[in-house]
Image (spheres, grey):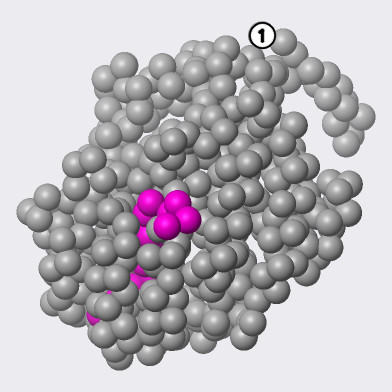
Amino acid sequence: MPRTLILQPDGRVTRQHRTALTSLPPLSVYIHVPWCVRKCPYCDFNSHAASEIPERAYLDALRADLEQALPSVWGRQVISVFIGGGTPSLLSAAGLDELLATLRSHLRLLPDAEITMEANPGTAEAGRFRDYAASGVTRLSLGIQSFDDAQLQKLGRIHDAEQARAAIRMAQEAVSRVNLDLMFALPGQTLQACLADVREALSFGTEHLSLYHLTMEPNTVFAKYPPQDLPDDDTSAAMQDAVESELSAAGLQRYEVSAYARPGARCKHNLNYWEFGDYLGLGPGAHGKISFHDRIVREARARQPESWMERAGRGDGSHIAESRSLGSSDLPFEFMLNALRLREGVAASLFSERTGLSLAAIAHQLEAAVSRGLLDADPTRLQSSALGWRFLNDLQALFLPE
């Protein structure tokens, strides 16, 4: 395997194996729309409250961002697009149509590419769902969070339960695939209240559900002023188990840490993330991973929308805040951090295909994981055991660089 000489800060010269990929992984595109009506107190995403969004300036900058990225992905097919935020459904129907037209004119989108758009259940945005679908959106992801009005207020959401129900109906009429985001372990929430949310979500014939534990993320309002009546760890764990049982009985299998789906309804875009595929990240704060035959590069765009728009417009690459090649010591953890999120794991051969490293490079870590009962002993798969699934962080940590 090729090696690169690296000058360390202390003056030492070290050797590092370079990646040698025989084929490139599937490519997705992530587009970040950073604005929302009001930032929720639990949210640590790159989102910014705005009464009006600078749509024209944003679309011009997005085109410039894409055009500067083309040499990195030229000729590669795109299997999926995910438009996240923020609240992408603040884009006008014409704006979203232009955005997707720009992608099609610059990239080789597969005819059946999955195109997901996150949306707010507020009625103003929900009314645009049919227009979004006409432009090419094939999948809508709705940030419902709860059907309990009191909880929605505590979470700082701008919609109520009735608007959520209306948005689900309109989304299902507009596109064939709809995901609902729900949260649990909410302030003062009981097990029965948690299950009531899940059962109401199921009542719409939901094919895909994303379920997230409310956490106090750094640099959020909730981190500074945490709710006083959060469920304890035992109650939260009971909620997780009860929800999984309820959804399984309804035909939705937990295929990833936070994702449940009926057969054939898994999210292609997120599966590509977890299988260590490539993704081009466009927009303020967007992250990307792009593979070449001799290296794998992680990128991040400038976070502040105004700065990103101004820099992208220069055409000199200054909107890229970070770009670094992953070393051979980083790749095992990067791969396993994603792949082990899948309940069924991945084929062991995928490790070499996506990292360019031999599986022997992590033989000691695999042996340790199996001996501790955290990893399935099947040599043809990389899959957590039942114990490893419960203690996933411990399992993933075994693959951290030494």
Label 1 residue SS:
loop
Judge whether residue 319 is colored magenta: no
Question: Please, what is the three-letter code of the amino acid marked with disc 1?
Answer: Met
- Residue furthest left as drawn: 249
Q: Nearer the viewer, residue 107 or 208?
A: 107
Whether residue 124 is situated above or below residue 387 in the rendered picture: below
Mark 1 neighbour class, 10 Å CA radius: few under 14, some 14 to 19, many 20 or more: few
Q: Position of residue 274 (x, y in %)?
A: 43, 39
Q: Position of residue 128 (x, y in %)?
A: 43, 71
Q: Residue at x 47, y 22 (%)?
A: 351
Q: Residue at x 78, y 69 (%)?
A: 306
Span shown in magenta: 134-147
Based on the displayed image, in which of its 4 quarters is residue 387 positioned?
Answer: top left
Q: Can residue 259 be seen by looking at this rendering?
A: yes
The residue at which mark 1 appears reads as 1
Q: Residue at x 34, y 40 (%)?
A: 342
- Residue furthest top as drawn: 1
Whether residue 337 is situated above or below residue 19 in the rendered picture: below
Judge whether residue 145 is colored magenta: yes
